Image (spheres, rainbow, N blue to C red):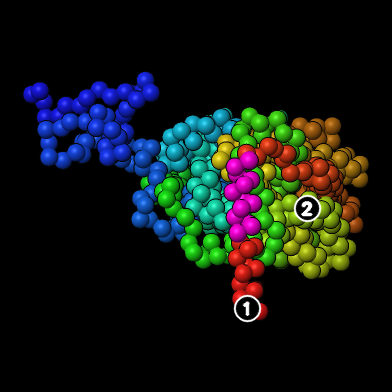
Amino acid sequence: NASSKRFIALQQNNKPLGISSLNSTQNLPLKFRYLSTLKSDSVDSPKKGIYDSLFGIESNVATPEFRSRWLMAIPAFATHMCIGSPWAWSLMADVCTRQIGFVAPAAADWTLMEAAFPLSIVFLLQGISASVVGKWQMKVGPRQAMMAASIAFGGGLSLGAAGIYLHSLPLLYLGYGFLGGTGIGLAYTPPVQTLMQWFPDKKGIASGLTIAGFGSGALLFTPCVQQLMKKFTVLPEYLGPASDFTTKVIDGKLFAEVVGRSDLVEVVQAGASELAKLPYQLSEGLYVVGTGSTGAAEALAVMGASYFAIMLASSLTLRRPHPSFVPTAAATTTSTTTTTNNTAPAVVADVSLEDAMKAPQFHLLGLTFFCLATGGMGMFSVAKPMMSEVFSTMLPTVVTSAFAAKFLLMLSAGNLGGRLGWAAVSDWIGRRKTFMIFTAGSVPLYLALPTLVETVVTSGSATPLYGFCASTMMAISMMGGVFAILPAYEADLFGTKFVGAIHGRMLLFSSAAALAGPYILLNLRSISEKAAINDLLTKIAPEKFEAVFGAPMANASELLAAKTLSISKLLACAPPGTLDPTPHLYDTTMYTLSALMGVAVIAHGMVRPVRQVVPSNVIDVKVTEVAAKEELVGDREQKTK
């Protein structure tokens, strides 16, 4: 043959042998060996392109010599730190409610419900996308999945920034919500599953360490965005005190007559209560609508580009362990000691995704997950504005705009600490007992919050405020712990082989919680706010109302829709001694969340180990291994005697 190589067509058991079968010919009969005109028996493999070298199937596996498994925690943590930034969305939501009015919401500004809704869309799409692409992720490997996630998440934040800049809710929802949420779903499970493969002896720590990055996302996002917004902020045009101008209310909007301008100018009136919530030193009075910029759009665009770069770099460094990898001797010794001193570890056969979906344990655990996540996501959706609304009027020198931002950071720290701390606790006492602490402990935490608020109202002391912060921080830490140890809990119930796909389906309950949590909290708050306004209207004389707002009391609903009417402005013209109802706007929400935690107690109490048929050879291996260890210990004790 004129070619440099010629191979004999081989067949064994009526199946053609591939090139990989021919790489070692010593174990084959002579008739199955290939002939070559070259001195070397090696076979040239086809050249790989750059994409295959970086994101191909083989690029997902580490070399046999690589043993530094702790280094793999860096890209896993960094990726989750990026996609965990939505936990700080309440910072952006608060700014978006006054994007046009700047100092106070204008008629064209978004409501808090509209501005907080991107958080629900993000986590909704996280669960849906993780559920849909689970099998695809297993096929292509973590690197390609994380590369696609970096494009989706970074691009989503940039598109969302354009939505804020153009004041387009659909564009904000499409970019930050749908595209960003899809990026989170793509990037969520691959780092978790990969790090659990590096730490088979410490699954709780592995999942907790990775998902801790998800909880720490707000700790990075909040200070960075605050500094960026300060850099890009443009202060609005200040006209002067409201008493110096003639104002008119047209279709619920407030207009002022300005000397030198032929047309009426739309304005917003900022009082002491509104300015106390801002990080700027501004004067009370009238401000022209649409003349300032909060810098939120520019800040979000910068963060989107930064997250894209970090996630792409992480996708290029994360790899699965080589099949020959085993944990270090120290880890093996620890595992052996634990097994010897206690009972033998239970053998959990791998349950497929389809069978896991049919098991009642999956749905009961999912219901528990839903209840606990609903409370935490609801709190995160309005953390900053809630702190300002509830406590700023009672403790104006303590609860400033900076304190409200620090409260968001405190919740983020609780989220991070819970993912790390509770993961370690779960490896010590077990996942089931840890979940029992979550469910039973969350009930009194949410139930105590209205009482703490009332104590601040009656005493005027800041001590109950710190108790409020501590209680919410502990509740958030438990939600973070749920996210951290849930993959390990699923591995305890269904095995580790399909835990990535199973956890992707489990995140659908998180998606439902992302919708339910903010909706329950904001809807109940809206109901309480309307009831409080109606109660205040009964205490104000119609003549005084018309003199202050320039419209009869019959138009109160129109003024409220245009954001010209608020509780703080009604209190200014209410009789002396009228109590401020603002601190109690969230009471019904907290009672509802406490009841939801009670449902979680019942649901988790019904979770039992999965009954499954384990292959006999697996049982024999484990039993033999345990018996050998017991015999070895007995021999050592006999020799000691």
- The residue lying toward the viewer, choosing from 43 and 101, is 43
Residue hosting label 1: 640
x 68%, y 65%: residue: 341
Which picture quadrant has residue 206? bottom right
Say left or right for 495 vs 592: left
Q: Percent position (x, y) of residue 552? A: 82, 34
What kind of residue is marked 2?
Met
Question: Looking at the rendering, in which quadrant would you find the N terminus?
Answer: top left
Find the distance from the CA under tag 2 to the CA under tag 1: 43 Å
Instruction: Say what secondary structure mark 1 lies in.
Output: helix
Q: What label does residue 436 carry, if any?
A: 2
Say left or right for 128 vs 613: left
Tell us which disc is closer to us: 2 or 1: 1
Q: Percent position (x, y) of residue 128? A: 60, 32
Disc 1 residue crowd, few under 14, some 14–19, many 20+, Cα 10 Å: few
x 47%, y 55%: residue: 326
